[in-house]
Amino acid sequence: MKAKTIAFILLAVLLALFTTPVYAQGDVPPLPHAFYGTVKINGSPAPVGTEVEARGEGVLTGVEGNPVITTVAGKYGGSGPLEPKLIVQGEIADGAILTFYVNGVSTGQTAEWRTGEVTEINLTVSIPPGTTETPPPETTETPPPETTETLPPEPTETLPPEPTETLPPEPTETLPPEPTETLPPEPTESLPPEPTETLPPEPTETLPPEPTESLPPEPTETLPPGTTLKPAAFNLSSLIISSNEVTLGESVTISVEVANTGEEAGNYKVTLKIDGVVEASKEITVSAGASQKVTFTTAKDLAGTYAADINGLSGIFVVMGEVPPAESGNWPVLWGVIGGVIVLGLIIFLVPRRKAY
């Protein structure tokens, strides 16, 4: 009975060892470094929709948390535990230098990356009006022209013409024309013309011509000599995204108002960027003192958060997708718990029996 008890205990210990998960030390990623604070553009609080990003060696960009889009004017993130922050993560060495960007323009401000820390840093940047970040042009490789082999023409065999047999024409029978019967014309009855009643013309009333009012010509404004008009100047406002949340493949309409504050008409190029990549451009002509609404339409087939930018005005929209199924990485933990329960049950079952013997 003692040998049986020892065998049960060894079996329980082996089962617990094989079902307990073993994690390699390198599988645990380092904790990210979070940042928050104020952000100003040209000395004024940055508008809602401004993009704040951190870059550096090994830093993951274009992911959730980096960049972060402002939801309050002049502020990115917050100090509260539940407020959003700029999350900097990746394969980063402790103490690595980070550089901060606002709407794709470097602020010149830096900070050291420390795992697991939360740091407040206030950002300022100068961005001239109408400045946009233009991606480098793609280079295309022109393949060399293919060489073609010219083959000599194949010889053709000329055959003599085949003899043809000439047949005499067949005789045709000529028939005499058929006689035709000529009928006398039918007599017609001549009726006298019907009398017509001639009515006198109706009198017409002649009205005197209506007097016409001669309006003086409208005065035209003549500028004094030496006076020049202000050239066209453009301001953008009222960035509107039709829907903040859409489904996969659903269209999103993004519009902006362009106003010409100059005294002359001018042309202006409006460019839509999605996540920093040029999506579409339009060339418009706006009269002096007038404004024009420019609209773009886009659709995305991948779920995620997208940042839209039109000539410096930014906004975000979210494409909703299917929730991924739960990962199977928790099975080792579950088997470890089951093994521990089995060991504890065997110990509780066997210890009282040993005392009885």
Image (tube, grey):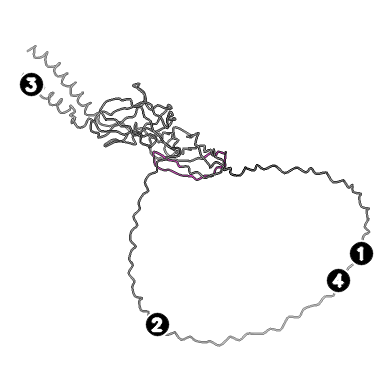
Which residue is denoted by mark 4 in the rendering?
A: 186
Task: Classify 10 Å Cα crowding around label 4: few (below 14), some (14-19), many (20 and above).
Answer: few
Q: Disc 2 marks which amino acid?
A: Thr
Residue 239, given in percent of the width and then of the height, sits at: 48, 34
Mark 4 or 1 closer to N-term? 4
Mark 2 touches mark 4? (CB < 8 Å): no
Q: Nearer the viewer, mark 4 or mark 1?
A: 1
Considering only vertical position in the picture, is 43 above or below 344? below
Mark 1 touches mark 3? (CB < 8 Å): no
Which residue is denoted by mark 2 in the rendering?
A: 158
Which residue is denoted by mark 1 in the rendering?
A: 191
Q: Residue 225 falls in which quadrant of the image?
A: top right
Q: What residue do we see at 77% from left, 78% from top?
A: 180
- Segment tinted magenta in the rendering: 271-293
Mark 4 or 3 closer to N-term? 3
Mark 2 or 1 closer to N-term? 2
Q: Is residue 287 magenta?
A: yes
Considering only vertical position in the picture, is 156 above or below 315? below
Q: State the separation of the CA atoms marked 4 and 3.
A: 143 Å
Q: Residue 124 falls in which quadrant of the image?
A: top left
Viewer-closest of 15 and 129: 129
